[in-house]
Amino acid sequence: MLEKENTEENVKVNEELNTKKEVQNSEVVKTEESQKEVNIDCLINENDNEMKLKFLQYFPDKETRERIINSLEHKIAPELYRLVNLAQKMIREFIKEVYKDIAVEKQESINIVFNTTNIKYANFKKAYNIDIDYKKRNLLISEKRKFQQNKVLGYIIHGYAHLFSNIKYTKNNNSIIEEGNADIFTDLVINTYIEKHPHENLGFHIEMPYSIESAYIDENSIERTRLYALSKLKIDKKMLLEYFLGDKEKFIKAVEGENATETDINNFNLKEFYNKNKFAFEDIDEKSIYYLKNYILPLYKLQNLVADIDILKEGNNPTEVVEKYFKGEKIDKMDPEKLEQIIRLIKQININNDKIFLPLNQFLFEEFNKLTDMEKKMSCEVIIENTLIMLKYKEVSIYCEKLITEIIQYLINDLERGIKLNKNNKILQRIEELDDTFGMENEDAEENIKDLLSYLRAKIEIASNGHITAEIFFKRLQSTVKNSLNIERNEELAGYQTIREELKGITK
Amino acid sequence: MEEKDLILKEIENEAKNELKGKINETAVGYIKVLNKKIEEKAKEKGIDFEIKEKEGKQID
């Protein structure tokens, strides 16, 4: 139904349509205020998306609007057809899960974006993965990624997120919110779908939990932290969709408060946000999707553990933080489980932001130097377990080599003197958890420590079992073969069989 | 190729090498991180160079 004040526009619609085609047996809509007839069929048959979208505003009834939106045209390259269909299906399912009853306007935005966006591969000269043109409604994907379908799926959904966000493009949106939210949207859409369809064969593998490979570290950390806070109020997904499909102001007010200004949303303050939303960060769930690609939540988690000092800033000394946590206890008294928790959190922070903490690899050296020889001998089990934790997280400097070998030797001496260990299983487990390298940047030092640890392990096993069992021996052999030899599986199995038979021959 | 272009090409290669092992080229937003690095390095070498965001376009 046309409104009175738009009668002039109505004349324009007819003029435009009639200059292009003759009207033939077409459906006619009579308005209440106007005697002018509007040719819906002609509009629908036009090959001009922009014109259709321009005049959509004059058709308030749902059925006509649906007809116009469904008549919008777009081109999807044949080789992308399957993935685009899958992406659209995933998005629709996610949105249905969040909104049991989606508002008409939001549903229309989704359909308009899907029905107007042209998607194809392109050969880019620069290192682009995605190129979106909001005015031409093109989404181009780098041809180089053609054979990495899991990545292309992520690019398509990330691209659609930007297109939803910019359906009425006026200017570029704030990059932090836009990129962080686009990544989160992609992760949520794909993870939600796979959880609901765990046995569906997509034709390619997706590592779970899915998280789009992204260079947007700060963007993800900030937005995921904001949405984590909203998740405690169970409005995270709704607000995320409000950002993309509805009113961005609502999203801004939800994350930063009713009086939030553009400055607040642009300048995320670690301490202020933590203090304002303490209720949300009391017991941070590391399994949350918002914990992925996020250095802020681990930092908040660590802040909870060391409440006495402020670590929500750059340049923290990790040794001081650990000392504070253990209330001045030295490494011979530090509980290994608790030490591992602190070190793990610091590593999670460092991976994504190396300015919050100074390097961690001096910590062990500094701790060793605080111990007397007597303390080293008396508590070598605990010290070794804590050392193994630092080796696992590859935070041991080359200067620790001599100190580590000294401690290991103390324990070996104890074993050889028949002293019973309290932590033999734990130490064996910690040795098993080590990687091939310890990140010490000196191969000789690493080999030296590995040899000693191997000897220590054998000593512990002999002390526990009386001898090294065939089972332990073969487990060790398989681990060595797997890690250091490039050998066919059949050859490997034949080798073990030969050794078994030879050993039987010897024992006879 | 002009001298400035040659230097910028060299800077781009340096920047790419520095990002190796930290961020893959397949990551969304790689180009933006690369461009930012190139701008910083160009500034250090006293070269006036800025990559402007294009209106109506989004690259990732």
Image (spheres, coloured by chain):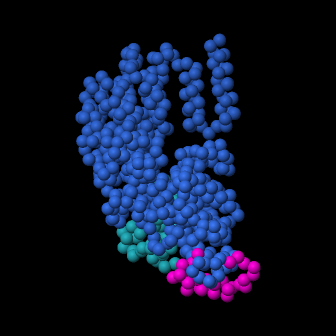
Chain colours: A blue, B cyan
Q: Quadrant of the C terminus of chain A?
A: top right
Where's residue A333, x and y in %?
29, 28
Question: Going 65% across and 16% down the picture, which residue do you hit?
Answer: A504
The answer to whether residue A28 is left or right of residue A196 is: right
Looking at the image, residue B19 lies above or below residue A350: below
Residue at point 46%, 30% (across, down): A431
Classify residue A29 by image quadrant: bottom right
Residue A149, compared with residue A467, is above or below; it is: below
Give the vertical position of A440 relative to A7 (above or below). Answer: above
- Residue drawn at x 56%, y 37% is A484
* Relative to A502, A290 lies left or right: left
Q: Quadrant of the N terminus of chain A?
A: bottom right
Q: How many marks?
A: 0
Q: Position of residue A257 (x, y in %)?
A: 34, 58
Q: Could one spot residue B13 in this view of the protein?
A: no
Residue lying at the far front in this picture: please name it: A32
Task: Tell me if residue A372 can be seen.
Answer: yes
Q: Nearer the viewer, residue A503 or A8?
A: A8
Front residue of B22 and A15 = A15
Residue B18, percent across and down? 45, 59
Dominant secondary structure of the residues highlighted in magenta in the image: helix
Magenta span contains residue A19: yes
Q: Is residue A93 above or below residue B31?
A: above
- In the rendered image, the residue lying farthest to the top is A508
In terms of depth relative to the viewer, which is nearer, A149 or A376?
Answer: A149
Residue A443 position in % (x across, y down): 45, 41
* Magenta-highlighted residues: A1-28
